[in-house]
Image (tube, rainbow, N blue to C red):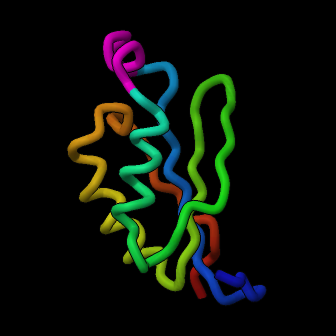
Amino acid sequence: MAAPFGVLDGLAVRLNGTRLDPEVYAAGDLQATVDALAAAVGETGRLWSYWTGPLETALYFYGPDADALRVRLEDAAAGLPLLERCRYVPLTPRD
């Protein structure tokens, strides 16, 4: 999938790395969570990158419509414990 400049919207899912129950981190499978989110967005976009910092991990999704991405990601998040307290951050400005 090519990414022509200015055509795609971006949305970050920022996973909380410090405020969940320790059991969630111990039992959580980050790769399974990422795979579930990537599958959930389907044809509305794709995961392009990630970043891991001391307080959170960010997953960067891009597609033609950030709102459509968010709907699918939020629906998937309901069943994924590592996404408790996550934040959705738009990466592209609205006109």
Q: Quadrant of the C terminus?
A: bottom right
The residue drawn where x is 31% and y is 68% is 71
Q: Quadrant of the N terminus?
A: bottom right
Determine whether, in the image, residue 2 is placed left or right of residue 13: right
The residue drawn where x is 50% and y is 51% is 13
How many tags in the picture?
A: 0
Is residue 79 part of the magenta span, yes or no?
no
Q: Toward which corner of the image does residue 86 lie, by quadrant?
A: top left
Q: Which residues are magenta?
A: 20-28
Determine whether, in the image, residue 71 is placed left or right of residue 46: left
Return the x and y of residue 53 as percentages of the image width and height: 68, 30
Is residue 25 part of the magenta span, yes or no?
yes
79 vs 48: above or below: above
Return the x and y of residue 12 as percentages of the image width and height: 55, 56
User: Please, what is the dominant secondary structure of the magenta stretch?
Assistant: helix
27 vs 65: above or below: above
